[in-house]
Amino acid sequence: MRRKGNGGFGGLDRSEGTFAERLGARLRAVRTGKGLSLLDVQQSSHAEFKSSVLGAYERGERMISTTRLERLARLYETPIDELLPPEQPRVITLEAGARERTTTGEALTIDLRRLESRRDRDSERVHSYLEAIQLRRRDRAGAVLTIRRDDLRALAAILGTDQDGARRRLEAMELLLVHA
C-alpha cells in the first residue's frame, strides 16, 4: 500500500486500499478526532473493544462486524454512516447507447408498512436504521421514507454489501416504491 503525504484521507489516497483499510483509516480518524486513545476506548467500553482488536480494525487487518460497528458508533456518539469511508471513485465503461444503472445520487422510497410486516433479520436491521433516520428528521408519521445516497451507503454496510447490492436486496424484499 502506497502512503501519501498530507493529500490523502487518513494517510491513504481515497482511491487506494482495500475496504477494510479505508474503513480502518476512517475509524482511526474519528477516534483521534474525538481525542481518544485506543486505551481510552477500551476503558470507556468496559473492555468490549480491546485496544489490540480496535487497532487491528484501524490497520485494516481485521474486518469489524456491522453489529460491533453500530456499538462503536454509539460509543463515539456519532451516526454510523460517519464511521464509513468515503466512496471510491468508480470508472464505468458503457457500451454505445447503454445507460448507467447505478444507485449513485438516486433517492429511494421505502414502504415502511411493508417493512413492519416482515420479521427476518435483514428487515429488522433495515427497520432499526430507518427509525434512526426518522428520529433525526423528526418524521415519525409517514408510511414511506425516502432515503438519500449516504443513507443507502450506511444500509449497504449494515447489510454487508455495496450500494447496488443493498438496492437489489431492498427490491427483493419488495420494499421499494417505483417512481413513474
Image: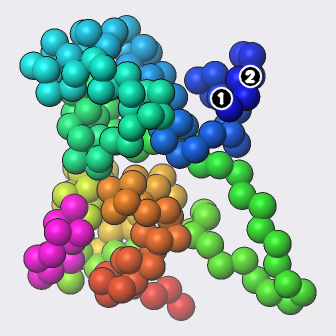
Give x and y (percent) for residue 95: 85, 84
Residue occupying image coordinates x 82% and y 78%: 94
- Whichever of callouts 1 and 2 sits on the residue coming sooner in the sequence is 2
Q: Is residue 74 magenta?
A: no
State the predominant SS element of the stretch in magenta: helix
Can see residue 108? no
Dot 1 corresponds to which residue? 12
Give x and y (percent) for residue 168: 45, 79
**Gap between marks 1 and 2 measured at Cα:** 6 Å
Point out which mark residue 4 bears: 2
Residue 120: quarter of image: bottom left
In this rendering, the answer to whether 155 lies above or below 60 is below
Q: What residue type is labelled 2?
A: Lys
User: Relative to the observer, which residue lies in front, 59 or 158?
Assistant: 59
Q: Tags 1 and 2 in contact by the CB under 8 Å rule?
A: yes
Colouring rule applied to residues: rainbow
Mark 1 element type: loop
Report whether 91 appears left or right of 177: right
Q: Which amino acid does label 1 sit on?
A: Leu
Residue occupying image coordinates x 29% and y 41%: 69
The span picked out in magenta is 115-125
